[in-house]
Image (tube, grey):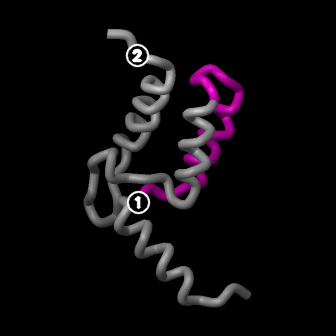
Amino acid sequence: MKTDGRDKRRRWLKNQLAKYTCNCGEHQPHRLMFYPHHKKIRHLNLRYGLKHNKRLEIENLIMESSVLCWNCAADQKEDLRMFPEF
């Protein structure tokens, strides 16, 4: 069975998430995200290869992120909207 590069990149991102646990105790990688940069990390990861120089940018974004489950991330996003920006 032949897999394409995107499968390898998806697997790499899932393995990165497998190292973490959310504050609520959720530990399944498919239910976790790198908050708030998950969308950008996923985009860069799927667009560029594992050996591309964008890997450093992805790793920096991961370090700047908190790992949350999707429910906690939604709660976090909702709580931030309650407070006005200064």
- The residue depicted at 58 percent of the width and 89 percent of the height is 83
Mark nearer the viewer, 1 or 2: 2
Q: Position of residue 20 (x, y in %)?
A: 37, 48
Let me know if residue 51 is in the magenta part.
yes
Give the mark nearest the N terminus, 1 or 2.
2
Residue 64 position within the rendered picture, expressed as x and y whole percent measured from the top left: 60, 54
Quadrant of the drawing holding the N terminus: top left
Query: x, y (%) of residue 29?
Result: 33, 45
The front one of 60 and 37 is 37
Q: Give the residue at x 42% y 70%.
A: 74
Tell me: residue 25, above or below residue 54: below
Give left or right: position of 71 versus 13. left
Determine which residue is flagged by label 2: 3
**Residue at the spot x=50%, y=20% of the render?**
5
Q: Position of residue 46 (x, y in %)?
A: 56, 33
Task: State the extent of the magenta-drawn residues as a range.
Answer: 48-68
Amino acid type at image mark 2? Thr
Residue 53 is marked as none
Secondary structure of the residue carrying tag 1 is: strand
Judge whether 36 appears above or below 79 on screen.
Answer: above
Residue visible at 46% across and 74% down?
76
Q: Residues within 10 Å of mark 2 (few under 14, many from 20)?
A: few
* Real-space Cα separation, disc 1 to disc 2, in angstroms: 29 Å
Few, some or many residues within 10 Å of mark 1 (<14, 14–19, 20+): many
User: Which residue is denoted by mark 1 in the rendering?
Assistant: 68
